[in-house]
């Protein structure tokens, strides 16, 4: 039996417990948490990777029944004032209306309550504060987790592996002195809004491609300004009333703001997005939360001997852009489970651990790129093209590596780390694509010209359909990525109309040569995909512990856990209860709902949820 101690009961800890119980039916899982109330909750928007992981946890039915479908990310780029009353205020880019892997916008309070109900029978809960972990250097000997209980007494818990999910408490980071300052900082302010006038959002004047496949409200909305971006995330409320998460994330030194609150946010919106100010003033603010300079990192995340791991916010914080926080939990939890599997079998090596940590550090390199996006967020041309290329990379590299399970191969993890190197602050190359070309393309303030120069090209650049992980041709997808990047470069060049402008001829020649280089890479990899796929190591110590590799996600005939059985039993009991006659009052005033008639999910929703700060 493997003994696992999880420090913390936020989103990261709950999902880790559910996954570990699914994967290792004989594991003994102890969850230690002081049960602090009132912590901020953030992380309502999911992406395809996140949704697939949650479905692997058995949460698919819950997502479908209790949360809203999310039809992609939608971006709004502010236009200068145009002529006439119908002149658009924004360029809008949204996902094309095609069949795709699903994603969802979560009501985190009801979602966390559902997780609580599912992990109840799977873990031993200890209410207390971890004061330290004593590590053992003896093979096979347990680590000792020291806990101060609520009554002031102490307790020691033995564990083969300790997973720190303590969020911003960062228990192991502080104990081992692992704190590391990030190169860039962020601040966020957000709240839940209910009962607002939805017509104010639906009625924005937009320059957009028409589609009739989904209601444009049900997306994650992104608005941009100088040094900041704003999210609006529709959520399903318990009452059925419209509800959204509304928030702003900013780089304080770029935006020129230090502390953001509701009044200051209204001033920013009045200046840049007056329709959004009207939107939030039309509703009721249910709560609010804020983080100031909240970014941090660690010098190490995974112990080379597999004794301890930092998961989620216990190790580093994410910018909420691209909904990447929970998405990387969906990477880290299988990584940690894989290392525990290898440790159980005596095959875990420091090289494997270092490779997976290198994959994690590649995400920090991406964060550095996003940090520098804040300098161009108020530029519709540069930001729009940046997002097109970034999404293209996500669907051609990240999603295939994830769905196929390749990211758990040490060779592939090293390849990702090589493709995404980290630069010192000030040495970061331009973070928007085709820099010289977009510099020229962005030199206009004419609204109609800006619309022409920022086409929505997602339908032709993003492969949205992944259904069979064993059939994903990773090499051919990378080949297509380079071919599409060449196409995008030439499309941008054509929008500049260089033929009739001799001053652009040197630029056109240079950009054509660069596009040719991408086409050459595309051809070589397309003809011989092995040149890209060979990075997957065949060494047993480097290979994924899951077989086949994609079994980490949907393993056949795997232990799903007692919580799922309990959920089925609860719903069956509720169905039987619905068939019973209603209880009548003595004076026959009408039917009164008995406890047996309570909907199956009511105990979960009525349970007071534990908040967390997982991004």
Image: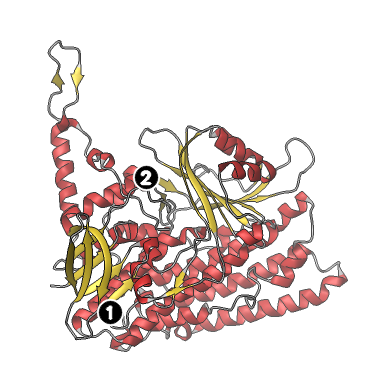
Residue 479 vs 282, above or below: the answer is: below
Q: Residue at x 44, y 85 (%)?
A: 530
Q: Dot 1, how many residues are within 10 Å of its Cα: few (below 14), some (14-19), or many (20+)?
A: many
In the picture provided, is 416 more to the left or to the right than 301?
right
Q: What is the quadrant of residue 386 in the picture?
A: bottom right
* SS under mark 2: loop
Give the camera-side residue of 257 and 581: 257
Q: Residue at x 67, y 47 (%)?
A: 90
In the picture provided, is 592 more to the left or to the right than 333?
left
Q: Which residue is mark 2?
A: 67
Residue 132 vs 594, above or below: the answer is: below
Q: Residue at x 19, y 21 (%)?
A: 592
Where is residue 487 shown, x and y percent of the image?
A: 64, 69
**Is residue 555 something one can see in this rendering?**
no
In the picture provided, is 600 more to the left or to the right than 205?
left
Where is residue 178 shown, x and y percent of the image?
A: 41, 75
Where is residue 36 shown, x and y percent of the image?
A: 31, 52
């Amino acid at each position: 039996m493997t003994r696992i101690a999880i420090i913390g009961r936020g989103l990261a800890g709950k999902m880790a417990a559910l996954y570990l119980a699914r994967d290792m039916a004989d594991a003994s899982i102890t969850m230690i948490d002081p049960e602090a109330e009132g912590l901020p909750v953030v992380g309502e928007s999911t992406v395809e990777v996140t949704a697939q992981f949650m479905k692997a946890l058995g949460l698919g039915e819950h997502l479908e029944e209790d949360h809203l479908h999310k039809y992609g990310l939608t971006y709004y780029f502010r236009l200068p004032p145009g002529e006439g009353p119908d002149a658009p205020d924004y360029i809008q880019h949204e996902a094309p209306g095609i069949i795709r892997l699903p994603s969802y916008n979560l009501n985190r309070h009801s979602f966390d309550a559902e997780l609580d109900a599912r992990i109840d029978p799977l873990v031993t809960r200890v209410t207390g504060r971890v004061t330290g972990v004593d590590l053992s250097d003896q093979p096979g000997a347990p680590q000792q987790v020291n806990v101060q209980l609520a009554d002031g007494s102490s307790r020691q818990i033995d564990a083969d592996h300790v997973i720190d999910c303590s969020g911003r408490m960062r228990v192991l980071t502080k104990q081992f002195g692992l704190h590391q300052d990030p190169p860039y900082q962020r601040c966020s302010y957000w709240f839940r809004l209910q009962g607002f006038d939805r017509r104010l959002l639906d009625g924005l004047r937009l320059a957009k491609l028409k589609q009739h496949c989904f209601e444009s409200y049900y997306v994650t909305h992104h608005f941009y300004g100088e040094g900041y971006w704003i999210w609006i995330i529709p959520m399903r409320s318990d009452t059925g009333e419209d509800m959204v998460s509304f928030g702003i994330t900013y780089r304080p030194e770029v935006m020129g703001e230090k502390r953001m609150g509701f009044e200051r946010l209204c001033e920013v919106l009045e200046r840049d997005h007056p329709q959004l100010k009207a939107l939030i003033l039309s509703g009721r603010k249910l709560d609010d939360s804020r983080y100031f300079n909240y970014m941090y990192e660690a010098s190490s995340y995974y112990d080379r001997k597999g004794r301890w791991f930092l998961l989620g916010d216990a190790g580093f914080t994410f910018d909420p852009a691209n909904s990447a926080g929970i998405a990387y939990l969906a990477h880290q939890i299988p990584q940690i489970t894989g290392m525990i599997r290898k440790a159980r079998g005596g095959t875990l090596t420091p090289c494997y651990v270092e490779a997976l940590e290198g994959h994690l550090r590649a995400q920090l390199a991406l964060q550095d790129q996003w940090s520098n996006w804040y300098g161009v967020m108020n530029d519709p041309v540069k930001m729009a093209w940046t997002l097109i290329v970034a999404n293209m990379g996500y669907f051609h590299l990240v999603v295939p590596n994830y769905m196929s399970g390749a990211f758990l191969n040490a060779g592939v993890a090293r390849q990702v780390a090589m493709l995404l190197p980290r630069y010192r602050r000030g040495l970061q190359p331009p973070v928007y694509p085709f820099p010289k070309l977009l510099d020229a393309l962005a030199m206009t303030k004419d609204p109609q010209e800006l619309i022409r120069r920022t086409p929505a090209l997602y339908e032709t650049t993003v492969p949205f359909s992944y259904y069979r992980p064993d059939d994903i041709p990773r090499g051919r997808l990378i080949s297509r990525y380079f071919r599409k990047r060449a196409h995008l470069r030439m499309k941008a060049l054509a929008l500049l109309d260089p033929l009739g402008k001799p001053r652009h001829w040197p630029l056109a020649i240079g950009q054509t040569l660069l596009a040719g280089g991408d086409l050459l890479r595309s051809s070589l990899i397309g003809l011989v995909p092995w040149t890209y796929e060979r990075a997957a190591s065949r060494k047993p110590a480097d290979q994924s512990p899951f077989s086949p590799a994609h079994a980490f996600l949907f393993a056949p005939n795997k232990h799903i856990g007692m919580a799922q059985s309990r959920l089925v039993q609860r719903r069956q009991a509720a169905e039987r209860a619905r068939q019973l006659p209603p209880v009548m009052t003595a004076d026959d005033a009408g039917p009164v709902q008995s406890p047996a008639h309570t909907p199956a999910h009511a105990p979960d929703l009525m349970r007071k949820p534990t908040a967390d700060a997982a991004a």
